[in-house]
């Protein structure tokens, strides 16, 4: 059984399922929910909302990260689990793999996809990239 489990958590239904799976399957592990702020998202925000949105994108992304991490904490409140939350900035797949390598993670758990529509088409599959690049077991939850 792994001692340290990293869960990619973005607040999507599949990431909720992944987090629930992790805390139920590895009750004695330290579970870390990672949320990655992707700077590329600011480009989409600027295209949709113009320059005023561009100026506030990072603050808005941090607020979203806080809300997502609070949701992770709330979701696991009924489980006796040692949950940690962390927010990183960068390309999601790269940040997840690097965090796992740098923090002694034994297992990664993530949903098969979090985003949909144009974001997923442009950014590619984070789950697929993590699965290919990670040097530790990755569990994909559908």
Image (spheres, grey):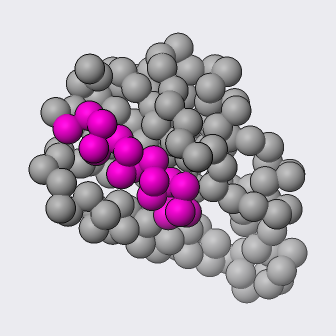
Instruction: Provide the major secondary structure of the magenta segment.
Output: helix
Q: Nearer the viewer, residue 28 or 53?
A: 28
> Is residue 77 located in the magenta-colored stretch of the structure?
no
Q: Position of residue 105 (x, y in %)?
A: 36, 25
Q: How many marks?
A: 0
> Is residue 12 located in the magenta-colored stretch of the structure?
yes
Q: Position of residue 37 (x, y in %)?
A: 57, 56
Residue 90 shows up from this direction: no
Tell me which residue sits at (36%, 51%) in the image: 20
Tell me which residue sits at (34%, 33%) in the image: 5
- Outermost residue to the left: 80
Which image quadrant is residue 91 in?
top right
Q: Tell me if residue 130 comes above or below residue 14 in the rendering.
A: above
Query: Viewed as shown, does residue 27 lie left or right of 68?
Result: left
Query: Viewed as shown, does residue 133 lie left or right of 13?
Result: right
Q: Position of residue 130 (x, y in %)?
A: 62, 30
| Extent of the magenta region | 9-27
Tell me which residue sits at (38%, 45%) in the image: 21
Q: Position of residue 42 (x, y in %)?
A: 73, 65
Tell me which residue sits at (66%, 49%) in the image: 113
Query: Viewed as shown, does residue 116 lie left or right of 84?
Result: right
Residue 55 shows up from this direction: yes
Q: Nearer the viewer, residue 117 or 56?
A: 117
Q: Nearer the viewer, residue 115 or 26?
A: 26
Image quadrant occupied by the N terminus: top left
């Amino acid at each position: 059984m792994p001692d340290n489990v990293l869960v990619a958590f973005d607040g999507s239904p599949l990431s909720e399922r992944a987090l629930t799976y992790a805390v139920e399957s590895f009750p004695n592990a330290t579970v870390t929910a990672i949320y990655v702020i992707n700077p590329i998202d600011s480009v989409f925000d600027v295209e949709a909302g113009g320059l005023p949105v561009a100026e506030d994108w990072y603050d808005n992304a941090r607020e979203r990260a806080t809300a997502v991490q609070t949701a992770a904490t709330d979701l696991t409140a009924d489980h006796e689990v040692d949950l940690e939350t962390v927010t990183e900035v960068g390309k999601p797949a790269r940040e997840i793999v690097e965090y796992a390598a740098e923090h002694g993670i034994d297992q990664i758990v993530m949903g098969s996809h979090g985003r949909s529509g144009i974001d997923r088409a442009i950014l590619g599959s984070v789950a697929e990239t993590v699965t290919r690049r990670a040097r530790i077991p990755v569990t994909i939850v559908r």
